[in-house]
Image (tube, rainbow, N blue to C red):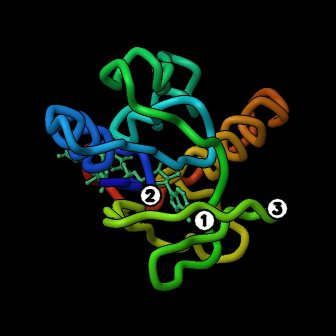
Amino acid sequence: MRVIVVGAGYAGVIAANRLRRRSDARVTVINPRPDFVQRIRLHQHIADTGAATVPLADMLRPGIDVHVGTVDKIGDGALRVEGGSELEFDRLVYTVGAGVAAPAGTFGVGTWEAAVAAREALRALASGGRVTVAGAGLT
Ligand SMILES: Cc1cc2nc3c(=O)[nH]c(=O)nc-3n(C[C@H](O)[C@H](O)[C@H](O)COP(=O)(O)OP(=O)(O)OC[C@H]3O[C@@H](n4cnc5c(N)ncnc54)[C@H](O)[C@@H]3O)c2cc1C
């Protein structure tokens, strides 16, 4: 059985590792990057106080294939990865997470791409520059 897991966050990594235990499952994980992003540490990446990524190879059981890319179309038994390649599956696990769009003029913390942009903006800030944090939860 060919199983594709779309999205290698917490849910996708755990699902892939559990499915790999089944001897009849060939598991492929598709993720935009070869790293696992710890979303709960993105604020540390932004503030440059800690790392937020771990290589996926260190997280996944041996025998799981990793395909780096972003899925942009899913059909009946096949999907397309941005850029053109098509992959076939018998079962699909869709674990792409959730996000909140940051309003224009702000930097979000919820995705790797947003955190990278926020960190760069902070680094470019002149000394003494003012930063406003919207939202006073733990993050
Ligand atoms: C700043 C921050 C702090 C948090 N702190 C906590 C906390 O302290 N405790 C807690 O329990 N939770 C916390 N959360 C929530 C927690 O991070 C999420 O609940 C969790 O990440 C959800 O896991 P997930 O696997 O569903 O999705 P994600 O971790 O978001 O993983 C989804 C993956 O799918 C990939 N993906 C998306 N679209 C595609 C596509 N089209 N094709 C291929 N891949 C795709 C993404 O790039 C990503 O790698 C926090 C979240 C944030 C943003």
Query: Closest to the observer: 76 or 83?
Result: 76
Amino acid type indicated by mark 2: Val
Marks 1 and 2 sit apart, C-alpha to C-alpha, by: 7 Å
Marks 1 and 3 sit apart, C-alpha to C-alpha, by: 9 Å
Instruction: Kindly indicate whether the residue at mark 2 contacts the one at mark 1 (C-beta within 8 angstroms).
Output: yes
> Is residue 139 visible in the rendered structure shown here?
no
- From the top left corner, tell me how far across and down residue 28 is, in percent: 44, 44
Amino acid type indicated by mark 1: Val
Query: Closest to the observer: 14 or 53?
Result: 14
Q: Residues within 10 Å of mark 1 (few under 14, many from 20)?
A: many
Specify which label sits upstream in the sequence, 1 or 3.
1
| Residue designated by label 2 | 6
| Residue designated by label 1 | 71
Question: Against 78, is 97 above or below?
Answer: above
Q: Is mark 2 within 8 Å of ligand 1?
A: yes
Q: Is residue 87 left or right of residue 11?
A: right
Residue at (30, 22) in percent of width and height: 61
| Residue designated by label 3 | 83
Q: Quadrant of the C terminus?
A: top left
Residue at (35, 22) in percent of width and height: 59
